[in-house]
Image (cartoon, helix red, strand yellow):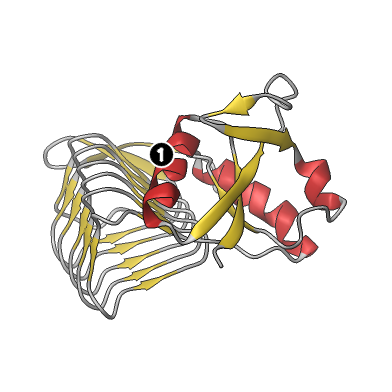
Amino acid sequence: MADKVLIYGASGHGKVIIDIMEREGRYKIVGLLDDNPAVQGQTFFGYPVLGGFELLNEGAYHDCQLILAIGDNLARKRLWERIRPLGYKLACAIHPSAQLARDVTLGPGTVVMAAVAINSGSRIGENAIINTGATVDHDCVIGDYVHISPGAHLAGNVYVGELSHIGLGASVIQGIKIGRNAIIGAGAVVLEDIPDNVTAVGVPAKVIKGHADL
């Protein structure tokens, strides 16, 4: 019998997760949650939007696992920090076309999208997103709440800190460390370590600004 799951977020990202879970066939999607009253009680991509956070707080769906369909890293973290004390468990979503080496580890709540490749020895944290067509080579460490955007490529032994975002089509050479809460711009080529709390863009990538610690 398939495990029951609730998807939190009636969004474009939510549509992708629904498609992945339907293709996997491991879960029965009970419905969606969203805190926007305008979508509650409506149907989204074929499933009912049952309500918002209050339903979890009431314990109405304690027999369901959750997956957070929220693309923004910090928003995803803050939502899970509210939900975690309620005792719910997180599901993972892995597209059938993704290629994962046998010793890859995925943290709870992580989403792996179509045509992704994750090679041997890599460890992916909690509530991370490895988006369409991204590649993560051997022995990489991807922190919690990281988003690796579509078509981004990480060579071997890359470290990406919590809450960081690797932009569309960016490339990171082997052995690089990207700090916590860093943003790597679309198409950037990262040849040197990137510190915490900065944005880096260009070829080669250079830091252009800092931002507040989270």
Give me the residue at 40% from left, 42% from top: 19
| Residue 83 or residue 212, whichever sits in front | 83
**Front position in the image: 111 or 137:** 111
**Element type where label 1 sits in the image:** helix
Q: In the visual, does 128 lie left or right of 148?
A: right
Residue at (84, 51) in percent of width and height: 57
Q: Is residue 214 above or below residue 102?
A: above
- Location of residue 50 by image quarter: top right
Per the image, the residue denoted by label 1 is 16
List x then y, in percent, for residue 6: 63, 49
Q: Amino acid at mark 1?
A: Val
- Residue 29 is situated, as x and y percent measured from the top left of the image, at 57, 49
Query: Is residue 34 depicted above or below 95 in this figure?
Result: above
Determine crowd level at label 1: few under 14, some 14-19, many 20+ residues with C-alpha closer than 10 A: some
Instruction: Tell me if residue 187 can be seen.
Output: yes
Quadrant of image for the N terminus: bottom right
Residue extending farthest top: 38
Q: Position of residue 25 (x, y in %)?
A: 43, 57
* Residue 63 in which image quadrant: bottom right
Residue in view at x 45 percent, y 58 percent: 110
Q: Horizontal placement of 76 versus 37: left or right?
A: left
- Give the image location of residue 85, x and y in percent: 77, 63
Height in image: 173 above or below 198? below
Give the side of residue 46 with respect to residue 139, left or right: right
Return the residue found at the far front: 1
Left or right side of 69 for 87: right
